[in-house]
Every structure is written in structure tokens, then in C-alpha cells.
Image (cartoon, grey):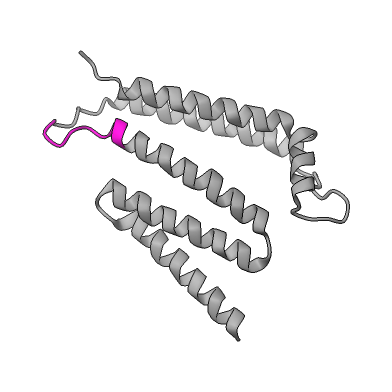
């Protein structure tokens, strides 16, 4: 009975803060609501007995929120500036490029991992298993993700650079 109440409380906090993260008007409030949702998901992981995953949830995603807040501040125009006119050609090129990227990405992902099994031994979700996967089978995807994040940060800096 008590575990059901705790589960429902975590679920309500996650759902409410996720809705607030989408519908609040100020970016800082959106980020704080998202952080609340992430902490609640970490609490749910602790409740389920996955303490390591909960710690990763807080470290990775709350750290990512800090970067997201910086991106929002960097990419948001000042209130007094009129928004730039949208160039439809650039939008179409961006959509087409993104679509092509995702088609290639998912085709490669499907071809590589469709029948992959990610269990190692008897332990599931342990630190040893995660470390083993990151150091052996998932080393290249892990480094690719690191590179993609680096490119995203550099792209945000380039986009935020003011035109003189």
C-alpha cells in the first residue's frame, strides 16, 4: 500500500512538472520544471532499486539542463529586437537535410542492432555491466555521441554570435 502511494506521488510529480515544462512562458521556468521532472524520475529509479541509474539520471540530465539554459539564453533574441524574417529556402534545406540524416541514421541503426542482445551475464543494470558495455561494445557509439554533443555546442556558439 505504501509503495503504491509513493509510486503515484512520483508519477504525479513527473506528469505535472512535464506539463509545466511545456506550457510555462519563461524559459527559466521551463528548465526548472524539467529539472523537477528529472529529479522525480531519479526518485522513481531509486524507488525501483536502480540507484546507479538514478545517479546517472541526475548527473547527466541535470548537467544537460545547465547547458540547455545556456543555449536558450544564447539563442534567444533580446526582447527589444524584432524577429528576423524567415527564409523559406533555408528552412526547406534544413528540413531536407535533417530528414536525410535521420533516414541514414535509422537505416544504419536498424542494420547494426536489430537483433542485438544487450544483457551480459546474470547481472542487469549494475555498474560493472555498464562499464563493460561502455569500454567494449559501446565504445565507438559513446565517442560518436560525445563528438555530436561537441558539434552541437560549437553550433550553438556560432548561431549565438552576434552579427556586426
**What residue lies at 56% left-to-right and 59% top-to-bottom?**
42
Residue 52 magenta: no
Q: Left or right: where does residue 136 sit relative to residue 73?
A: right
Residue 2 sits in which quadrant? bottom right
**What residue lies at 61% left-to-right and 62% top-to-bottom?**
45
Q: Is residue 107 above or below residue 21?
A: above
Q: What is the x, y in percent for residue 162? A: 25, 19
If the image is split into quadrants, where does the C terminus sit? top left
Q: What is the x, y in percent for residue 150? A: 51, 25
Residue closest to the eye, 145 or 109: 145
Q: What is the x, y in percent for residue 31? A: 36, 49
Residue 80 magenta: yes
If the image is split into quadrants, where does the N terminus sit? bottom right
Q: Residue furthest right?
A: 121
Q: Is residue 52 above or below residue 163?
A: below
Q: Which residues are magenta?
A: 73-81
Q: Left or right: where does residue 127 sit relative to residue 68?
A: right
Q: Residue furthest top?
A: 164
**What residue lies at 47% left-to-right and 28% top-to-bottom?**
152
Residue closest to the eye, 86 or 135: 135
Q: Is residue 54 above or below residue 144?
A: below
Q: Left or right: where does residue 116 sit relative to residue 162?
A: right
Q: Main secondary structure of the magenta part?
A: loop
Residue closest to the eye, 20 or 107: 20
The tally of labels here is: 0
Amino acid at each position: 500500500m505504501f509503495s503504491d502511494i509513493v509510486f503515484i506521488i512520483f508519477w504525479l510529480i513527473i506528469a505535472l512538472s512535464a506539463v509545466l515544462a511545456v506550457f510555462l512562458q519563461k524559459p527559466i521556468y521551463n528548465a526548472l520544471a524539467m529539472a523537477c521532472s528529472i529529479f522525480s524520475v531519479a526518485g522513481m529509479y531509486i524507488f525501483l532499486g536502480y540507484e546507479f541509474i538514478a545517479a546517472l539520471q541526475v548527473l547527466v540530465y541535470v548537467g544537460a539542463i545547465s547547458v540547455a539554459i545556456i543555449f536558450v539564453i544564447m539563442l534567444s533574441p533580446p526582447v527589444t529586437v524584432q524577429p528576423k524574417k524567415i527564409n523559406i529556402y533555408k528552412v526547406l534545406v534544413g528540413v531536407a537535410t535533417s530528414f536525410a540524416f535521420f533516414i541514414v541514421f535509422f537505416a544504419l541503426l536498424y542494420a547494426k542492432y536489430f537483433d542485438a542482445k544487450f544483457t551480459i551475464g546474470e547481472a542487469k543494470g549494475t555498474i560493472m555491466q555498464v562499464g563493460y558495455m561502455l569500454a567494449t561494445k559501446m565504445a565507438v557509439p559513446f565517442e560518436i555521441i560525445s563528438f555530436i554533443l561537441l558539434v552541437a555546442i560549437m553550433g550553438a556558439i556560432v548561431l549565438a554570435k552576434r552579427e556586426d
